[in-house]
Image: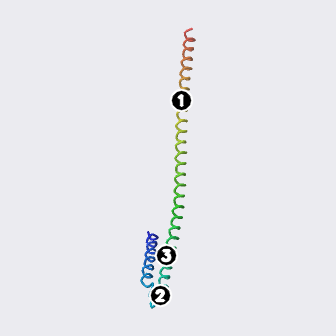
Amino acid sequence: MRIALLTEDVAALAARVREECALVQGDAAVRTDHWVRARKAQANRIAEAHAEAEAGLAHLRDKAMTAYGKLRAAEKAAGVFVERALAEAERKAQSEADDLSNTRRLFKLRSAMRARLMARRSEYLDA
């Protein structure tokens, strides 16, 4: 906003110089040396303020870019962390499901073996 105001000041000063030059154009009695120095000083002050504002804006842009880069890096790191955590939770859930399935299968095998053993004992005792 400050840069825009300073740009407007430059345009206003240029318009003022044109108007005042047009007023005294044919009058040889009017001395313009002090006036020209004052306008040049005024133009220099505006140019310096404009340069300072541009430098400040460039600095703020650099800071914003750095902050944005850090934000993107943090978002990416957070995304990787979440993905790894989800993958680990999925692996854990799958491992638990596999363990449960294996345990059920082993219980069925034990039950079948016990049933066979009981049947053999029964046959042996009956004979």
Q: Which residue is mark 2?
A: 32
User: Type of residue at label 1?
Assistant: Ser
Q: Quadrant of the N terminus?
A: bottom left
Q: How is the image coloured?
A: rainbow
Q: Secondary structure at mark 1?
A: helix
Percent x, y of residue 109: 56, 23
Q: Which residue is mark 1?
A: 101
As displayed, is residue 101 above or below residue 79? Answer: above
Q: Image point 51% across, 62% down: which residue?
A: 64
Q: Nearer the viewer, residue 87 or 36?
A: 36
Q: Image point 52% across, 43% down: which residue?
A: 86
Percent x, y of residue 118: 54, 17
**Residue reaching furthest to the top:** 127
Q: CA distance from mark 3 to mark 2?
A: 25 Å
Q: Image point 54% across, 14% down: which residue?
A: 119
Q: Image point 45% across, 86% down: which residue?
A: 26
Q: Which residue is mark 3?
A: 49
Q: CA distance from mark 1 to mark 3?
A: 77 Å
Q: Nearer the viewer, residue 25 or 55?
A: 25
> Dot 2, how many residues are within 10 Å of its Cα: few (below 14), some (14-19), or many (20+)?
few
> Dot 3, how many residues are within 10 Å of its Cα: few (below 14), some (14-19), or many (20+)?
some
Q: Nearer the viewer, residue 54 or 38?
A: 38
Q: CA distance from mark 2 to mark 1?
A: 101 Å
